[in-house]
């Protein structure tokens, strides 16, 4: 593992956690971030005080704010930037990249410009033959960095690439499962954030465990409907990148999307809630993109629709819940 190298792009909590994990496994690791001042602080403090305080960096974890350093360090790139910055990051990286570049990502969401999936952006900017993989599953960054037991899925159309990446990350208390269903893993990771906002809203309104369980279960049904239409496999949504990630983000307050929903349910306005959390809330843009995809393909996604209306049409959260409960009675499946 000492001869293996990986460059991780994105120095937020998740990118930092994966960099710590790879380095802890013995891999030579480079962590890149776009903000030179932030990266200088990481290099000086040897920890990410802003996002993951008191979790020191291994000695084999290097820091940079220069994309040119990334290209010379390794052809294996793991991108951990927010989904809205995914395309811009790849475009900026391309001039420095080698012909044998391999791209993985742990970003969750759709491209905000057109609602496309992130693997489509990789193929557009590089080639359809470029080795590509997505990492997703029920993971909170702090628990990964703190070396608590965790499992996730790596999905790739190239099994050898999935195996190579899993070799770097798998080990100790971190378990990797592989999959060939890139689309299913991407959809599960994107839409679960929308449903986490909905679950947070319900809890903020003071509803109980019954409501939360119903939202999670019917929300999973919405993920499956959209995911299968887009080309995902139904069994993927019953695994770590589907049900597992959905349960995590809907039930634990480490989830930024859930905390955002809680704030809305408690009566706070959108801007105040965003400022209070102070980090990227992927479910806000994902709600719009998921809603538009559902309309495009004629898919019924009532929880997503009501969440969208709360975020973009100023619908009162309580009214959104009442709209869901007043829908026509129907068979479960």
Image (cartoon, rainbow, N blue to C red):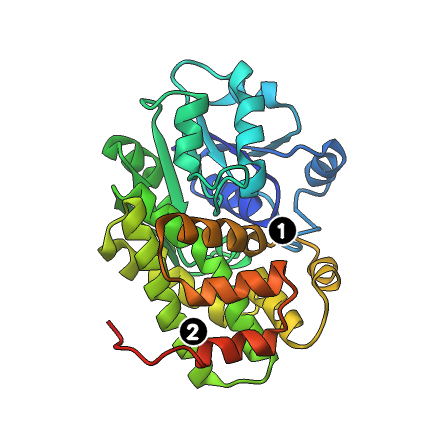
Query: Left or right: where does residue 279 sit relative to residue 185?
Result: right
State if disc 2 and disc 1 touch (CB < 8 Å). Answer: no
Find numbered disc 2 in the image and state the secondary structure of the residue it sits on.
Answer: helix
Mark identifier at residue 280? 1
Q: Residue 114: x, y in percent?
A: 49, 38
Q: Which residue is drawn at 58% across and 23% down?
A: 92
Count residues near mark 1 (Cα–Cα under 10 Å), then give few for <14, some for 14-19, many for 20+. Answer: some
Between 104 and 313, the residue placed more toward the observer is 313
Q: Which residue is drawn at 41% across and 77% down?
A: 327
Q: Residue 303: x, y in percent?
A: 45, 67
Q: Disc 1 or 2, which lies upstream in sequence?
A: 2
Image position of 6 with respect to 211: above or below: above
Question: Taking the image as drawn, is residue 190 in sight?
Answer: yes
Mark identifier at residue 215? 2
Kindly indicate the quadrant of the structure image that contains residue 117.
Answer: top left
Mark whose residue sits in front, 1 or 2? 2
Distance of label 1 from label 2 (alpha carbons): 23 Å
Between 263 and 104, the residue placed more toward the observer is 263
Query: Left or right: where does residue 272 sit relative to residue 123?
Result: right
Q: Residue 152: x, y in percent?
A: 36, 52
Q: Which residue is drawn at 40% across and 45% down?
A: 135
Image position of 218 with respect to 162: above or below: below
Between 120 and 22, the residue placed more toward the observer is 120
The N terminus - image quarter: top left
Question: Taking the image as drawn, is residue 249 in sight?
Answer: no
Image position of 65 with respect to 265: above or below: above
């Amino acid at each position: 593992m000492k001869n293996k190298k990986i460059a991780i792009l994105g120095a937020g909590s998740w990118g930092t956690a994966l960099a710590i994990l790879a380095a802890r496994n013995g891999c030579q690791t480079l962590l890149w971030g776009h903000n030179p001042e932030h990266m200088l602080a990481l290099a000086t403090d040897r920890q990410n005080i802003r996002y993951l305080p008191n979790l020191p960096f291994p000695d084999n974890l290097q820091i940079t704010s220069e994309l040119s350093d990334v290209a010379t360090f390794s052809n294996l790139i793991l991108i951990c930037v927010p989904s809205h910055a995914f395309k811009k990051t790849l475009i900026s990286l391309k001039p420095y990249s080698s012909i044998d570049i391999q791209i993985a990502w742990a970003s969750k969401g759709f491209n905000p410009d057109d609602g496309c999936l992130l693997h489509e952006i990789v193929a557009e900017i590089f080639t359809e033959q470029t080795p590509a993989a997505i990492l997703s599953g029920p993971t909170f960054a702090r628990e990964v960095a703190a070396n608590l037991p965790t499992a996730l899925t790596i999905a790739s159309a190239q099994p050898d690439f999935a195996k190579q990446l899993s070799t770097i990350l798998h080990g100790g208390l971190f378990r990797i499962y592989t999959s060939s269903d890139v689309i299913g893993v991407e959809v599960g990771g994107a839409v679960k954030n929308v449903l986490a906002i909905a679950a947070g809203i319900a809890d903020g309104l003071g509803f109980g465990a019954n409501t939360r369980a119903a939202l999670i279960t019917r929300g999973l049904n919405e993920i499956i409907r959209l995911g299968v239409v887009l080309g995902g496999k139904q069994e993927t949504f019953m695994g770590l990148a589907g049900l597992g990630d959905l349960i995590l983000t809907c039930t634990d307050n480490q989830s930024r999307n859930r905390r955002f929903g809680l704030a809305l349910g408690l009566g706070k306005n959108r801007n105040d809630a965003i400022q209070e959390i102070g980090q990227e809330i992927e479910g806000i843009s994902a709600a719009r993109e998921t809603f538009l995809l559902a309309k495009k393909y004629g898919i019924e996604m009532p929880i997503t629709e009501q969440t969208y209306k709360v975020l973009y049409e100023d619908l009162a959260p309580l009214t959104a819940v009442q709209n869901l409960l007043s829908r026509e009675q129907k068979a479960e499946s």
